[in-house]
Image (cartoon, rainbow, N blue to C red):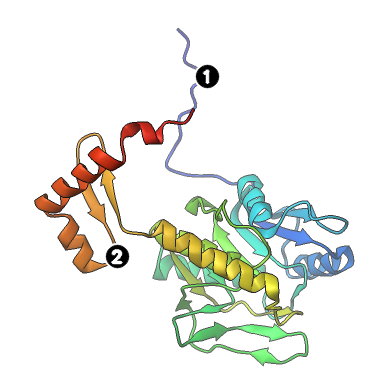
Amino acid sequence: MDFSFVKTLSSTERFPFRYSICTLVSKPQEYQEMINSFIQAGFSTDLCEYLCIDNSKTNTYDAFGGLNRFLREAKGEYIILCHQDILLHDHNINDLDKRIEEMDFIDANWGILSNAGGINLKYVAMHVTQNSGNRLIEHLLPLKTKTVDENFILVKSTSNLALSHNLKGFHMYGTDICLICETLGLTSYIIDFNLTHKSNGNADASFYKIRKELMRKYRLAWRGRFISTTITRFYISGNNLAFKLFNTGISMFLARQYYKFFRRKNKYYCK
């Protein structure tokens, strides 16, 4: 049999574009201004592809669904998920290339870069220019972060990231993708790439709704649980005491008895 149809993958990945610049568009004129600023900053169409979802007449996609579509479709080595209301001015494509090169040296395991985010429970890092012209400058960069602001998110394509499929809306997706990034063993950073973001954010009722849904989702996703494979059983938990307690022989025995009498196999059968 002729097996010439088999494609052998090499250790080197090639991408047709350096950057994929992806935007949900509700205001076409503002989006065109954004594109012009990118082109002027060196993000030319021979190096970059521009992908958009037209939400100007109706919501074709919410942010979670739309950005997942971008992440599936993008052919760039680096995928920029950005708002339509940003303008590049201080930095250009060469600056961003340098920041990426620096991050590859500092931490080759990075998956996400941004210009703003939450470092921990006390500190945030803001390296962005507001529409008023006020410049928020973070001098201690790059900084490892737990979350990123949604105005500008750069994703390394080889990280294979996606957003949650069980969340919807237009808020908190920067937090969601960082949590998924960390779960996959990758890191996120705030870098020196200043731009103008025309909006200061809008914490409306829909923001608090998705915040609550995100908290509920990850409480369930990260719950302690017993795991069974075809050849071994164990318990996973972020709680150190529970991790040690439930991985003992007696705990495993009692757990199996519970499933034997109260969670039989037929309860998992989908008719």
Specify the farthest residue to the bottom.
134
The kind of residue on which mark 2 rests is Gly
Q: Nearer the viewer, residue 248 or 39?
A: 248
Q: Residue at coordinates 47% horizontally, 15% vertically from top-left?
A: 3
Name the side, left or right, on which 14 lies relative to 89: left
Q: Which residue is mark 1?
A: 5
- Picture layout, residue 250 above or below residue 5: below
Residue 188, x across and y down, in percent: 47, 68
* Residue 45 against residue 99 in the figure, above or below: above
The percent position of residue 237, horizontal first and vertical second, equals 28, 60
Identify which residue is drawn at 40% across, 67% down: 107
Residue occupying image coordinates x 72% and y 66%: 42
Helix, strand or loop under label 1: loop
Give the side of residue 219 with respect to residue 31, left or right: left
Q: Nearer the viewer, residue 241 or 111?
A: 241
- Which numbered disc, 2 or 1, marks the residue that appears first in the sequence? 1
Residue hosting label 2: 238
Residue that protrudes farthest toward the left in the picture: 249
Q: Crowding at label 2, few (<14), some or many (≥20) Cα neighbours within 10 Å? A: few
